[in-house]
Image (cartoon, rainbow, N blue to C red):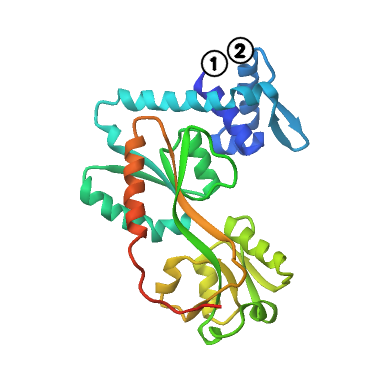
Amino acid sequence: MDAQQLQSFVMVLELGSLSDAARKLGVTPAAVAARIRTLEDEIGASLVKRTGRYVKPTMAGINILERSRGLLRDMRDLRVAANTEGSLGELRLGVFPSAMTSLLPRVLQRLYRKQPDLKILVTSGTSLELSCKVGDGTLDASVVVEPQYPIPKSCEWSELVAEPLVLVVPAALAKADPHHLLTSEPFIRYDRQLLGGQLAERYLRQHGISPADRVELDSVMAIAALVDLGLGVALLPDWAPLWHAGLAIARIALPHRPPTRRVGLIWALHGPRAALAEAFFAEARAAVRRPRKADTTRKH
């Protein structure tokens, strides 16, 4: 049994696909399958099974999955502990794209005032990908949208900021009724593969609204730029940088308790950099508590 076999086993189950795991690992699907077969031979039990196009764990696979993640974390921590050149002061951090330009710079500014010698290696990706990397030990912590599944017991997630869904409109429409705009104006949709887009879709369905879709994008700022040009309206999380980007847009609060996107930090509770992750969280929480400047908002 070696790290490659365990890593392949864990990644296949997290992604549900041999081919997807192979792309992430930079090897062929046949190599991934061979590693898992070797692991099964050594353990003496079948660990995965195919269900149509997907790969799922057997009961034996479920039983050893969390322990396999723990072993991978322990192996990485051994490498860190053996390094004599101070890598214990190195935080491996994941950040989902929109937080890269909004939250991360403010937090790093605060953190480096207190720990100027700290080294941080930053990785970008989707919240799901980054959460999985914290779970398997590839990353120490990640700024992500709240995971929509139970996180591993070895990890902690804490909220930094709550962003309720709002209707983003051209400034000239700031006084209009939000539901009327959703049915009368072209709709610029936030990607439904992302949680923010899923929240928007849920709100529309709950209120029986079928907007006239014009385009679907995965970038909040790109959507806001289209709204600024008068190309439609959009349902987006109330993301602070939108209101300081110099765009002629306004936000209208939605009625009936709209859903909220919650952004926070997930980190590994154990290991040599847990204290660094907690220090990062403390500075991030302090950064987001700073008061925002006034912006154009109509309360409904």
Q: Which residue is mark 1?
A: 1
- The amino acid on which the numbered mark 1 sits, given as a three-letter code, is Met
* Residue drawn at point x = 66 percent, y = 12 percent: 44
Please name the residue that numbered disc 2 is placed on.
42
> Circle 1 sits in a helix, a strand or a loop, which is it?
loop
Around disc 2, counting alpha carbons within 10 Å, would you say few (fewer than 14), some (14 to 19), or many (20 or more)?
Answer: few
Q: What is the residue that sits farthest to the right in this orientation?
A: 52
Q: Nearer the viewer, residue 80 or 153?
A: 153
Q: Residues within 10 Å of mark 1 (few under 14, many from 20)?
A: few
Instruction: State left or right for residue 208 relative to residue 121.
Output: right
Q: Residue at x 45, y 70 (%)?
A: 242
Q: x, y (%) of residue 300? A: 56, 78
Do the residues under discs 1 and 2 have CB atoms within 8 angstroms?
A: yes
* Residue that appears at 60% across and 72% down: 255
Q: Quadrant of the N terminus?
A: top right
The answer to which of 203 and 30 lies nearer the viewer is 203
The percent position of residue 81, horizontal first and vertical second, equals: 32, 25
Name which of mark 1 and mark 2 comes first in the sequence: 1
CA–CA distance in space, label 1 to label 2: 7 Å
Q: Residue furthest front?
A: 256
Whole-percent x, y for residue 205 in the image: 72, 65
Q: Secondary structure at mark 2?
A: helix
Residue at x 52%, y 77% (from the top left corner): 299
Residue type at the position of mark 2:
Glu
In the image, residue 73 above or below residue 148: above
Horizontal relation, residue 234 to residue 245: left or right: right
Q: Position of residue 89 (x, y in %)?
A: 28, 36
Counting every numbered tag in the picture gives: 2
Tell me the quarter of the picture where residue 119 sits. top left
Give the label on residue 222, or none.
none
